[in-house]
Amino acid sequence: MDDAVLTAAALLVAGAAVYLGALIGWPRSWPFRRRDAGHHDDGRAGIAVVPSANGAPTQGQPGRPAPGRAGGSAPEPAPGGVMTSPRLPGRQTPAVRRFVIEPGTDSREPESRLPAQVLTTSGWHGSFFHGTCGTASSPRPTARLTVRGATLRGATHASLGTEGQDAIGAAWDEARSALYVAVADGLGSLPRSGRVAAEAIRATLHLCVHRPPALSFADSGERLFEAIADGMVRSLAADAGVLDGACTLVVAEVLPRFDGAEVTVHGVGDSEAWALYDGCWEPLHHERGGADNATRDLPAHSRPQTRSFLLSPGSVLLLGTDGFAAGLDTGTSPLARGLAEYWRTRPSWLEFVNHVSFVDEYYSDDRSAIGVWIGEGDARD
Protein backbone atom coordinates (compact mmCIF):
# COMPACT_ATOMS: atom_id res chain seq x y z
CA MET A 1 0.00 0.00 0.00
CA ASP A 2 2.80 2.40 0.90
CA ASP A 3 4.55 1.80 -2.46
CA ALA A 4 1.36 2.51 -4.36
CA VAL A 5 0.82 5.76 -2.45
CA LEU A 6 4.39 6.92 -3.14
CA THR A 7 4.08 6.07 -6.84
CA ALA A 8 0.84 8.01 -7.15
CA ALA A 9 2.33 11.01 -5.35
CA ALA A 10 5.33 11.00 -7.67
CA LEU A 11 3.07 10.94 -10.73
CA LEU A 12 1.03 13.85 -9.37
CA VAL A 13 4.16 15.93 -8.74
CA ALA A 14 5.51 15.21 -12.24
CA GLY A 15 2.20 16.09 -13.83
CA ALA A 16 1.99 19.32 -11.87
CA ALA A 17 5.50 20.28 -12.97
CA VAL A 18 4.66 19.72 -16.63
CA TYR A 19 1.45 21.71 -16.27
CA LEU A 20 3.18 24.64 -14.56
CA GLY A 21 5.96 24.56 -17.14
CA ALA A 22 3.44 24.92 -19.91
CA LEU A 23 1.84 27.88 -18.13
CA ILE A 24 5.05 29.87 -17.56
CA GLY A 25 6.79 28.89 -20.79
CA TRP A 26 9.79 26.81 -19.68
CA PRO A 27 11.73 25.57 -22.75
CA ARG A 28 11.65 21.85 -23.27
CA SER A 29 15.43 21.66 -22.86
CA TRP A 30 15.27 23.14 -19.33
CA PRO A 31 17.35 22.97 -17.14
CA PHE A 32 19.93 22.81 -19.96
CA ARG A 33 21.17 26.08 -21.58
CA ARG A 34 19.30 27.11 -24.72
CA ARG A 35 21.61 26.95 -27.74
CA ASP A 36 22.12 30.10 -29.80
CA ALA A 37 20.80 30.12 -33.32
CA GLY A 38 23.45 28.99 -35.75
CA HIS A 39 25.65 27.49 -33.02
CA HIS A 40 26.90 23.97 -33.62
CA ASP A 41 28.23 21.67 -30.93
CA ASP A 42 30.47 18.73 -31.81
CA GLY A 43 30.38 17.39 -28.26
CA ARG A 44 33.79 18.73 -27.14
CA ALA A 45 33.49 20.80 -23.96
CA GLY A 46 34.84 24.35 -24.13
CA ILE A 47 35.34 24.39 -27.91
CA ALA A 48 33.26 26.93 -29.82
CA VAL A 49 32.46 25.88 -33.39
CA VAL A 50 31.37 29.02 -35.24
CA PRO A 51 29.83 28.95 -38.72
CA SER A 52 32.06 30.44 -41.40
CA ALA A 53 30.87 32.72 -44.18
CA ASN A 54 29.90 29.76 -46.40
CA GLY A 55 27.91 28.05 -43.64
CA ALA A 56 30.45 25.34 -42.81
CA PRO A 57 31.46 25.07 -39.17
CA THR A 58 34.92 26.42 -38.31
CA GLN A 59 36.76 25.37 -35.17
CA GLY A 60 37.99 28.12 -32.86
CA GLN A 61 40.02 28.31 -29.68
CA PRO A 62 38.49 27.16 -26.40
CA GLY A 63 35.98 29.70 -25.20
CA ARG A 64 36.77 32.19 -27.99
CA PRO A 65 35.34 32.93 -31.43
CA ALA A 66 37.35 31.54 -34.32
CA PRO A 67 39.54 33.98 -36.25
CA GLY A 68 38.67 35.01 -39.78
CA ARG A 69 39.52 32.52 -42.53
CA ALA A 70 39.59 32.63 -46.30
CA GLY A 71 36.14 33.51 -47.55
CA GLY A 72 35.24 35.23 -44.27
CA SER A 73 36.49 38.05 -42.06
CA ALA A 74 37.32 38.63 -38.42
CA PRO A 75 34.84 40.55 -36.26
CA GLU A 76 35.18 44.31 -36.71
CA PRO A 77 36.22 46.35 -33.66
CA ALA A 78 33.35 48.10 -31.97
CA PRO A 79 33.59 51.82 -31.15
CA GLY A 80 35.94 52.51 -28.24
CA GLY A 81 38.61 49.97 -29.19
CA VAL A 82 36.83 46.77 -28.08
CA MET A 83 36.04 43.49 -29.82
CA THR A 84 32.55 42.02 -29.52
CA SER A 85 32.15 38.24 -29.53
CA PRO A 86 29.50 36.94 -31.99
CA ARG A 87 28.85 33.99 -29.68
CA LEU A 88 28.22 35.99 -26.55
CA PRO A 89 26.32 39.18 -27.42
CA GLY A 90 27.12 42.07 -25.09
CA ARG A 91 30.39 40.60 -23.79
CA GLN A 92 33.39 42.68 -24.82
CA THR A 93 37.11 41.98 -24.81
CA PRO A 94 39.40 45.05 -24.65
CA ALA A 95 41.76 45.35 -27.57
CA VAL A 96 45.47 45.72 -26.82
CA ARG A 97 46.48 49.35 -27.38
CA ARG A 98 49.91 50.97 -27.55
CA PHE A 99 50.77 54.57 -26.70
CA VAL A 100 47.18 55.69 -26.21
CA ILE A 101 47.09 59.45 -25.55
CA GLU A 102 43.75 61.18 -25.24
CA PRO A 103 43.47 64.54 -27.05
CA GLY A 104 42.68 67.70 -25.12
CA THR A 105 39.33 69.45 -24.98
CA ASP A 106 40.60 73.01 -25.57
CA SER A 107 39.21 73.95 -22.18
CA ARG A 108 40.43 77.09 -20.45
CA GLU A 109 39.92 77.25 -16.72
CA PRO A 110 41.10 79.90 -14.24
CA GLU A 111 44.75 79.32 -13.36
CA SER A 112 46.09 80.10 -9.90
CA ARG A 113 49.61 81.22 -9.04
CA LEU A 114 52.13 78.46 -8.47
CA PRO A 115 53.00 78.05 -4.76
CA ALA A 116 56.35 79.51 -3.73
CA GLN A 117 57.65 75.97 -3.31
CA VAL A 118 56.01 72.59 -3.89
CA LEU A 119 57.31 69.01 -3.65
CA THR A 120 55.51 65.72 -4.15
CA THR A 121 56.36 62.04 -4.66
CA SER A 122 54.91 58.96 -6.35
CA GLY A 123 54.90 57.14 -2.95
CA TRP A 124 51.70 55.13 -2.67
CA HIS A 125 49.61 57.12 -5.15
CA GLY A 126 49.81 59.63 -7.97
CA SER A 127 49.93 63.36 -7.27
CA PHE A 128 50.28 66.61 -9.21
CA PHE A 129 50.61 70.39 -9.01
CA HIS A 130 50.01 73.29 -11.39
CA GLY A 131 49.97 77.07 -11.60
CA THR A 132 51.40 80.13 -13.30
CA CYS A 133 54.37 82.28 -12.38
CA GLY A 134 56.33 85.23 -13.69
CA THR A 135 57.59 88.65 -12.71
CA ALA A 136 54.43 90.51 -11.74
CA SER A 137 56.21 93.67 -10.52
CA SER A 138 58.49 94.26 -13.50
CA PRO A 139 57.93 97.51 -15.46
CA ARG A 140 58.79 95.58 -18.62
CA PRO A 141 56.52 92.77 -19.76
CA THR A 142 57.94 89.26 -19.42
CA ALA A 143 56.59 85.92 -20.54
CA ARG A 144 54.14 84.14 -18.29
CA LEU A 145 55.18 80.62 -17.31
CA THR A 146 52.54 77.92 -16.93
CA VAL A 147 53.64 74.88 -14.94
CA ARG A 148 52.23 71.36 -14.90
CA GLY A 149 53.69 68.58 -12.74
CA ALA A 150 52.58 64.97 -12.20
CA THR A 151 54.15 61.90 -10.61
CA LEU A 152 52.48 58.49 -10.85
CA ARG A 153 53.28 55.24 -9.08
CA GLY A 154 54.26 52.62 -11.63
CA ALA A 155 52.50 49.33 -12.30
CA THR A 156 55.57 47.37 -11.21
CA HIS A 157 55.60 48.93 -7.74
CA ALA A 158 51.83 48.56 -7.46
CA SER A 159 51.91 44.85 -8.34
CA LEU A 160 54.72 44.21 -5.83
CA GLY A 161 53.05 46.23 -3.09
CA THR A 162 56.00 48.62 -2.81
CA GLU A 163 56.04 52.42 -2.81
CA GLY A 164 56.99 54.51 -5.81
CA GLN A 165 60.42 56.13 -5.85
CA ASP A 166 60.02 59.28 -7.97
CA ALA A 167 59.92 62.85 -6.66
CA ILE A 168 59.29 66.20 -8.36
CA GLY A 169 59.25 69.81 -7.23
CA ALA A 170 59.13 73.46 -8.26
CA ALA A 171 59.96 76.80 -6.66
CA TRP A 172 59.49 80.41 -7.77
CA ASP A 173 62.15 82.87 -6.58
CA GLU A 174 60.64 86.34 -6.72
CA ALA A 175 63.94 88.04 -5.87
CA ARG A 176 65.69 86.52 -8.90
CA SER A 177 62.56 86.30 -11.07
CA ALA A 178 63.46 82.66 -11.65
CA LEU A 179 61.58 79.37 -11.73
CA TYR A 180 63.33 76.18 -10.57
CA VAL A 181 61.95 72.76 -11.47
CA ALA A 182 63.49 69.37 -10.64
CA VAL A 183 62.74 65.66 -10.99
CA ALA A 184 64.48 62.72 -9.29
CA ASP A 185 64.18 58.98 -9.85
CA GLY A 186 65.16 56.59 -7.06
CA LEU A 187 67.10 53.47 -8.04
CA GLY A 188 64.83 50.46 -7.63
CA SER A 189 67.68 48.17 -6.57
CA LEU A 190 68.13 50.04 -3.26
CA PRO A 191 65.34 50.04 -0.63
CA ARG A 192 65.46 53.68 0.52
CA SER A 193 65.81 55.27 -2.88
CA GLY A 194 62.37 56.86 -2.68
CA ARG A 195 63.37 58.76 0.45
CA VAL A 196 66.67 59.73 -1.17
CA ALA A 197 64.86 61.10 -4.25
CA ALA A 198 62.51 63.20 -2.10
CA GLU A 199 65.40 64.62 -0.07
CA ALA A 200 67.29 65.40 -3.28
CA ILE A 201 64.39 67.52 -4.55
CA ARG A 202 63.98 69.25 -1.20
CA ALA A 203 67.69 70.11 -1.01
CA THR A 204 67.80 71.19 -4.66
CA LEU A 205 64.99 73.72 -4.34
CA HIS A 206 66.36 75.09 -1.07
CA LEU A 207 69.90 75.53 -2.40
CA CYS A 208 68.73 77.11 -5.65
CA VAL A 209 66.61 79.74 -3.92
CA HIS A 210 69.08 80.46 -1.09
CA ARG A 211 72.40 80.40 -2.95
CA PRO A 212 74.71 83.46 -2.66
CA PRO A 213 73.54 86.40 -4.82
CA ALA A 214 76.82 86.56 -6.75
CA LEU A 215 76.70 82.85 -7.71
CA SER A 216 74.82 82.19 -10.93
CA PHE A 217 72.91 78.97 -11.47
CA ALA A 218 74.71 78.24 -14.73
CA ASP A 219 78.13 78.37 -13.04
CA SER A 220 77.16 76.48 -9.87
CA GLY A 221 76.16 73.06 -11.20
CA GLU A 222 79.03 71.05 -9.75
CA ARG A 223 78.95 72.93 -6.44
CA LEU A 224 75.18 72.42 -6.22
CA PHE A 225 75.32 68.66 -6.84
CA GLU A 226 78.24 68.16 -4.46
CA ALA A 227 76.26 69.88 -1.70
CA ILE A 228 73.21 67.71 -2.44
CA ALA A 229 75.29 64.50 -2.39
CA ASP A 230 77.04 65.45 0.87
CA GLY A 231 73.71 66.28 2.48
CA MET A 232 72.29 62.88 1.48
CA VAL A 233 75.10 61.04 3.20
CA ARG A 234 75.01 63.18 6.35
CA SER A 235 71.24 63.02 6.87
CA LEU A 236 70.25 59.60 5.49
CA ALA A 237 73.26 57.29 5.79
CA ALA A 238 73.38 54.63 8.51
CA ASP A 239 75.86 54.65 11.39
CA ALA A 240 78.52 53.07 9.18
CA GLY A 241 78.13 55.85 6.63
CA VAL A 242 76.44 53.54 4.11
CA LEU A 243 73.50 55.02 2.21
CA ASP A 244 71.06 52.31 1.06
CA GLY A 245 69.53 54.53 -1.60
CA ALA A 246 70.45 56.56 -4.69
CA CYS A 247 68.73 58.62 -7.36
CA THR A 248 69.13 60.38 -10.67
CA LEU A 249 68.45 64.12 -10.72
CA VAL A 250 67.81 66.85 -13.29
CA VAL A 251 67.12 70.49 -12.36
CA ALA A 252 66.40 73.52 -14.54
CA GLU A 253 66.37 77.27 -14.04
CA VAL A 254 63.87 79.21 -16.18
CA LEU A 255 64.34 82.99 -16.46
CA PRO A 256 61.34 84.57 -18.22
CA ARG A 257 62.07 87.39 -20.68
CA PHE A 258 59.94 89.53 -22.94
CA ASP A 259 60.95 87.31 -25.90
CA GLY A 260 60.75 83.88 -24.24
CA ALA A 261 62.89 82.36 -21.50
CA GLU A 262 66.51 81.50 -20.76
CA VAL A 263 66.82 77.87 -19.62
CA THR A 264 69.81 76.20 -17.96
CA VAL A 265 69.76 72.49 -17.11
CA HIS A 266 72.04 70.44 -14.81
CA GLY A 267 71.62 66.67 -14.70
CA VAL A 268 73.07 63.38 -13.49
CA GLY A 269 71.69 60.10 -14.80
CA ASP A 270 68.81 59.11 -17.05
CA SER A 271 66.22 61.57 -15.80
CA GLU A 272 65.92 63.86 -18.79
CA ALA A 273 65.16 67.38 -20.01
CA TRP A 274 63.62 68.13 -23.41
CA ALA A 275 62.52 71.25 -25.28
CA LEU A 276 59.53 71.29 -27.63
CA TYR A 277 59.47 74.11 -30.19
CA ASP A 278 58.10 74.38 -33.73
CA GLY A 279 56.65 70.88 -33.30
CA CYS A 280 60.09 69.30 -32.76
CA TRP A 281 61.71 67.77 -29.67
CA GLU A 282 65.27 68.72 -28.70
CA PRO A 283 67.08 66.87 -25.86
CA LEU A 284 68.67 69.21 -23.31
CA HIS A 285 69.84 66.53 -20.89
CA HIS A 286 69.99 63.00 -22.23
CA GLU A 287 72.40 60.33 -20.94
CA ARG A 288 70.26 57.24 -21.25
CA GLY A 289 72.14 53.99 -20.53
CA GLY A 290 72.83 51.14 -22.91
CA ALA A 291 71.54 47.58 -22.92
CA ASP A 292 72.66 47.01 -19.32
CA ASN A 293 70.41 49.89 -18.16
CA ALA A 294 73.28 51.34 -16.11
CA THR A 295 73.08 55.01 -15.19
CA ARG A 296 74.98 57.57 -13.15
CA ASP A 297 73.39 58.47 -9.84
CA LEU A 298 73.75 60.55 -6.70
CA PRO A 299 75.57 60.52 -4.35
CA ALA A 300 78.23 58.48 -6.18
CA HIS A 301 78.38 60.89 -9.15
CA SER A 302 78.18 64.59 -8.38
CA ARG A 303 79.49 66.17 -11.60
CA PRO A 304 76.46 67.12 -13.70
CA GLN A 305 76.15 67.70 -17.40
CA THR A 306 75.08 71.30 -18.12
CA ARG A 307 73.37 72.97 -21.05
CA SER A 308 71.81 76.39 -21.61
CA PHE A 309 69.09 77.17 -24.13
CA LEU A 310 66.88 80.09 -25.19
CA LEU A 311 63.24 79.10 -25.67
CA SER A 312 60.92 81.28 -27.74
CA PRO A 313 57.30 82.04 -26.79
CA GLY A 314 55.08 79.02 -27.34
CA SER A 315 57.84 76.52 -26.52
CA VAL A 316 57.69 73.87 -23.80
CA LEU A 317 60.37 72.75 -21.36
CA LEU A 318 59.86 69.16 -20.19
CA LEU A 319 61.66 67.38 -17.35
CA GLY A 320 60.90 63.70 -16.78
CA THR A 321 62.13 60.56 -15.08
CA ASP A 322 63.04 57.67 -17.37
CA GLY A 323 59.66 55.99 -16.82
CA PHE A 324 58.14 58.81 -18.87
CA ALA A 325 61.03 60.27 -20.86
CA ALA A 326 62.06 56.88 -22.26
CA GLY A 327 58.91 57.05 -24.39
CA LEU A 328 60.30 60.12 -26.17
CA ASP A 329 62.47 59.20 -29.13
CA THR A 330 63.01 61.76 -31.85
CA GLY A 331 61.44 60.87 -35.15
CA THR A 332 59.82 57.52 -34.41
CA SER A 333 58.06 57.76 -31.04
CA PRO A 334 54.23 57.81 -31.12
CA LEU A 335 54.35 59.52 -27.72
CA ALA A 336 56.63 62.28 -29.01
CA ARG A 337 54.43 62.84 -32.07
CA GLY A 338 51.24 62.87 -30.04
CA LEU A 339 52.51 65.28 -27.40
CA ALA A 340 53.98 67.58 -30.05
CA GLU A 341 50.49 67.88 -31.49
CA TYR A 342 48.51 68.17 -28.23
CA TRP A 343 50.96 70.52 -26.51
CA ARG A 344 50.85 73.26 -29.15
CA THR A 345 48.68 74.97 -26.54
CA ARG A 346 48.91 74.23 -22.85
CA PRO A 347 46.63 71.42 -21.66
CA SER A 348 44.54 71.67 -18.55
CA TRP A 349 46.12 70.15 -15.45
CA LEU A 350 43.83 67.12 -15.74
CA GLU A 351 44.72 66.61 -19.40
CA PHE A 352 48.40 66.81 -18.49
CA VAL A 353 47.98 64.07 -15.87
CA ASN A 354 46.17 61.99 -18.48
CA HIS A 355 49.02 62.48 -20.97
CA VAL A 356 51.63 61.41 -18.42
CA SER A 357 49.58 58.26 -17.74
CA PHE A 358 49.54 57.18 -21.41
CA VAL A 359 48.52 53.56 -21.99
CA ASP A 360 51.36 51.20 -22.82
CA GLU A 361 52.00 47.94 -20.99
CA TYR A 362 55.75 48.09 -21.78
CA TYR A 363 56.28 51.18 -19.61
CA SER A 364 55.54 49.97 -16.07
CA ASP A 365 57.98 52.08 -14.03
CA ASP A 366 57.03 55.20 -12.05
CA ARG A 367 56.27 58.12 -14.36
CA SER A 368 57.01 61.72 -13.47
CA ALA A 369 57.09 64.86 -15.58
CA ILE A 370 57.10 68.63 -15.24
CA GLY A 371 56.10 70.79 -18.20
CA VAL A 372 56.66 74.55 -18.43
CA TRP A 373 54.81 76.44 -21.19
CA ILE A 374 56.68 79.60 -22.19
CA GLY A 375 55.10 82.92 -23.02
CA GLU A 376 51.34 82.53 -22.95
CA GLY A 377 50.50 86.09 -21.95
CA ASP A 378 52.03 88.86 -19.87
CA ALA A 379 53.09 87.72 -16.38
CA ARG A 380 51.78 91.02 -14.94
CA ASP A 381 48.17 90.20 -15.88
Image (spheres, grey):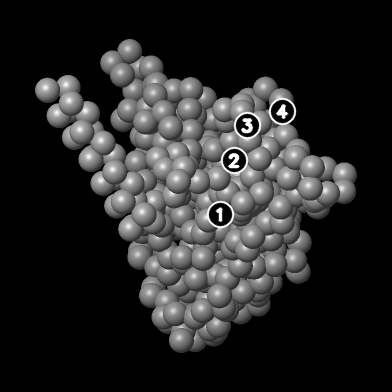
The residues tagged by marks 3 and 1 sit, at their Cα atoms, a distance apart of 17 Å
Question: Which amino acid is tagged 2?
Answer: Glu
x, y percent for residue 271: 58, 41
Question: In the rendered view, does 268 fall on the left or right side of 130?
Answer: right
Mark toward the start of the polypeptide (2 vs 3): 3
**Can residue 274 be spotted in the picture?**
no
Which element carries disc 3, helix, strand or loop?
Answer: strand
| Front: mark 1 or 4 | 1
Pick the front one: 110 or 14: 14
Amino acid type of disc 4?
A: Gly
Q: Nearer the viewer, residue 213 or 99?
A: 99
The kind of residue on which mark 1 rests is Pro
Q: Alpha-carbon distance for marks 1 and 4? A: 48 Å
Q: Label 3 near label 2: C-beta < 8 Å?
A: no
Quadrant of the image containing the N terminus: top left
Residue at image point 54% right, 30% down = 297
Label 2: which secondary element: loop
For marks 1 and 2, give the CA distance.
Answer: 28 Å
Q: CA distance from mark 2 to mark 3?
A: 30 Å
Please tell me the numbered disc located at residue 139.
none
Residue in the foreground of this view, choosing between 288 and 41: 41
Q: Are marks 2 and 4 in contact (CB under 8 Å)?
A: no
The numbered disc on residue 47 is 3
Dot 2 corresponds to which residue? 361
Residue that mark 1 sits on = 89
Residue linked to disc 4: 290
